[in-house]
C-alpha cells in the first residue's frame, strides 16, 4: 500500500474544482499528431524514444488528426505542405494546440531569404501556441516547450472560453 | 575507353552533330552535341559493344542566361568509363528530345529539369512537375526568376 492509499483510507473524497481536474487530465494526456517534416522530426523521434521518453508526459503519437490534441510542426513547412498542414489542423478536434518546433517552422529558418518554396513561419497559416527555438532543438528543448504548453492548459478555464 | 577514344568514335559516327570536344575542362572533360541528335547518340552509346554505357548517373539543367543547358553524366558499369555530354538550347525555345526511351532513369530527372528550369523534353511520356505543386507558375532555378508575392493566398517573402 502506498502513501496516498493510506491517506485516503478513512474518507476517500477529494475536493477540487472541475476546471483543475479536467485540465489535469487534459495536460497529462496530450496526444500528438504522428507526422514530421524535416530534420526536427528526428529530434522529435529521439524525444519519443527511451532516453527522453515523452510518453511519461502522456504524449502518444496518433496517426489520425481526429484523435489528436497537439500538433508538433517539426520542420520546414514548404508552400506545398502548408495547405496540407492547414487541412490537418482543421481536422483536429477542439481544444487543439500547436507546437512550432525549430527555426524553419518558427520563421523560415535558413530559407528566410532564398527559399522561394518555403513558408516563412507556420503561424502564417495556423495559430501557434508555443514556439521552440533551435536548429534543430534538442529533445530537452522540445520537452520544455511541451511543459510550457502544459502550463497553458493548466491555466485554462471552461467558463472562460480560451482563445 | 578513354575520353579521347570515345570522342573520336563519336565524331567519326556523327560528324556534324558533335559540336565541341573539350578535353581540358576544369573537372570532367565533356562533349557538346546538337540537341536534335542526342537520342541517336545516347542509343549508340548504350548499344555499341565498345561503349556499353549502361547507366545515366545524373541529368542536370543549367541556366546560362539566354541558353539553357542540359548535362548528362554517363557511366559504364561494365567497362568502367565515364562520359559527360552537354546540349544547349535557347531559353525562349527550350526543346530537347527526351532520352527516357534509352535510360529509364531519365524519366524523373527530366521531369525535375522541366520543373525547375522549364526545359521541354519532347517525347517524354509524362512531362509534369515532380517537386513543386502542379499549379506553380514559373521555373524557380532560372536566373531571371522572381519570387512571387503570394502563392494560394500565402505571403511568400519574409
Image (cartoon, coloured by chain):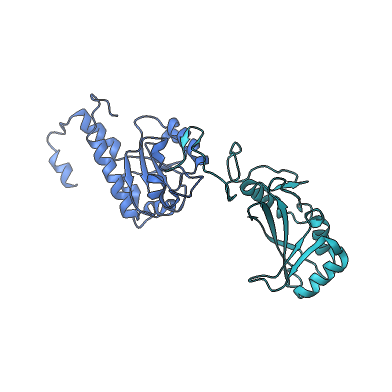
Chain colours: A blue, B cyan
Q: Foreground: A100 or B64?
A: B64
In-image side of B12 versus B30 (left or right): right
Residue most toward the right?
B13
Visible residue check, residue B11: yes
| Quadrant assignment, res A152 | top left
Q: Which residue corresponds to the image point at 39% horizontal and 30% vertical from the top-left?
A: A93
Quadrant of the snapshot with the N terminus of chain B: bottom right
Residue A25: percent from the left, percent from the top?
A: 28, 36
Q: Which residue corresponds to the image point at 27% horizontal and 25% vertical from the top-left?
A: A161
Residue most toward the front?
B66
Quadrant of the snapshot with the C terminus of chain B: top left
Q: Which residue corresponds to the image point at 31% horizontal and 54% vertical from the top-left?
A: A140
Q: Report the number of numbered marks.
A: 0
**B54 w.r.t. A68: above or below:** below
Q: Which residue corresponds to the image point at 37% horizontal and 47% vertical from the top-left?
A: A101
Residue B147: percent from the left, percent from the top?
A: 52, 43
Residue B64: percent from the left, percent from the top?
A: 64, 55
Residue A22: percent from the left, percent from the top?
A: 26, 32
Visible residue check, residue B1: no
Amino acid at each position: 500500500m502506498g502513501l496516498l492509499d493510506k491517506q485516503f483510507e478513512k474518507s476517500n473524497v477529494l475536493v477540487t474544482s472541475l476546471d483543475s481536474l479536467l485540465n489535469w487530465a487534459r495536460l497529462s494526456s496530450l496526444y500528438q499528431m504522428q507526422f514530421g517534416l524535416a530534420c526536427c522530426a528526428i529530434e522529435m523521434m529521439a524525444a519519443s524514444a527511451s532516453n527522453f521518453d515523452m510518453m511519461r508526459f502522456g504524449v502518444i503519437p496518433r496517426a489520425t488528426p481526429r484523435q489528436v490534441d497537439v500538433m508538433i510542426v517539426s520542420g520546414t513547412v514548404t508552400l506545398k505542405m502548408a495547405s496540407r498542414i492547414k487541412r490537418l489542423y482543421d481536422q483536429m478536434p477542439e481544444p487543439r494546440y500547436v507546437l512550432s518546433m525549430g527555426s524553419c517552422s518558427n520563421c523560415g529558418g535558413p530559407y528566410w531569404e532564398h527559399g522561394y518554396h518555403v513558408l516563412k513561419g507556420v503561424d502564417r497559416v495556423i495559430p501557434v501556441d508555443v514556439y521552440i527555438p533551435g536548429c534543430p532543438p534538442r529533445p530537452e528543448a522540445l520537452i520544455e516547450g511541451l511543459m510550457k504548453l502544459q502550463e497553458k492548459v493548466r491555466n485554462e478555464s471552461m467558463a472562460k472560453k480560451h482563445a | 575507353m578513354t575520353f579521347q577514344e570515345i570522342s573520336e568514335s563519336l565524331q567519326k559516327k556523327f560528324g556534324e552533330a558533335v559540336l565541341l570536344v573539350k578535353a581540358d575542362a576544369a573537372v570532367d572533360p565533356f562533349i557538346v552535341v546538337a540537341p536534335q541528335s542526342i537520342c541517336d547518340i545516347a542509343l549508340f552509346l548504350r548499344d555499341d559493344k565498345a561503349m556499353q554505357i549502361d547507366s545515366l548517373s545524373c541529368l542536370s539543367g543549367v541556366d546560362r542566361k539566354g541558353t539553357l543547358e542540359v548535362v548528362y553524366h554517363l557511366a559504364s558499369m561494365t567497362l568502367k568509363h565515364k562520359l559527360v555530354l552537354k546540349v544547349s538550347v535557347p531559353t525562349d525555345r527550350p526543346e530537347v528530345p527526351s532520352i527516357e526511351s534509352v535510360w529509364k532513369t531519365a524519366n524523373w530527372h527530366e521531369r525535375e529539369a522541366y520543373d525547375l528550369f522549364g526545359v521541354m523534353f519532347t517525347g517524354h511520356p509524362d512531362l509534369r512537375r515532380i517537386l513543386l505543386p502542379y499549379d506553380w507558375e514559373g521555373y524557380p532555378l532560372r536566373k531571371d526568376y522572381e519570387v512571387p508575392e503570394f502563392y494560394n493566398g500565402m505571403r511568400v517573402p519574409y
